[in-house]
Image (cartoon, rainbow, N blue to C red):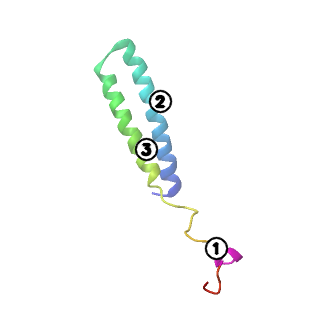
Amino acid sequence: MDFWVRGVLGWALMVAAVAGFAWCTIDLISTGTPWLIAGDIASVFAFLLGGWLFATRGREATQPGLPEDTPLANPRPFGN
């Protein structure tokens, strides 16, 4: 998957999981059905999956080191 696809999907999955967890918890207080407990558990796993997707998106615009065409690229040009 691409950098932006993983980032957006991970973020959206985490937001949806938080919203689903809140909805299931509020509804669980009033009704107490076991399906809402399963929804809470599924929301926790969905949040973890979204966090994993977001964390593994890679690096798009970051390269290690400094650019080579600036004076800061080699601060010690004489090997000191």
x and y percentages locating residue 66 in the rendered image = 62, 71
Magenta: main secondary structure equals loop
Instruction: Examine the rendering and report whether any part of residue 64 can be seen.
Output: yes
31 relative to 65, above or below? above
Local packing at callout 2 (Cα closer than 10 Å; few below 14, some 14-19, many 20+) is: few
Specify the quadrant of the image occupied by residue 22.
top left
In magenta stretch: residue 72: yes
**Residue at 34 percent of width and 34 percent of height:** 42
Q: Is residue 70 visible?
A: no
Q: Which residue is mark 2?
A: 19
**Which residue occupies the extreme right position in the image?**
71
Assign a secondary structure to mark 1.
loop
Whether 37 is drawn above or below 54: the answer is above
The residue that label 1 is drawn on is 67
Q: Which residues are magenta?
A: 67-75
- Secondary structure type for disc 3: helix
**Quadrant of image for the N terminus:** bottom left
**First-in-chain label (3 vs 2):** 2
At mark 2, the secondary structure is helix
Instruction: Report if residue 53 lies within the magenta region.
Output: no
Residue for point 47% across, 35% down: 16
Amino acid on which disc 1 is placed: Pro
Q: Is residue 31 left or right of residue 8?
A: left
Question: In the image, is residue 50 above or below residue 1?
Answer: above
Return the disc, 1 or 3, that comes first in the chain's sequence: 3
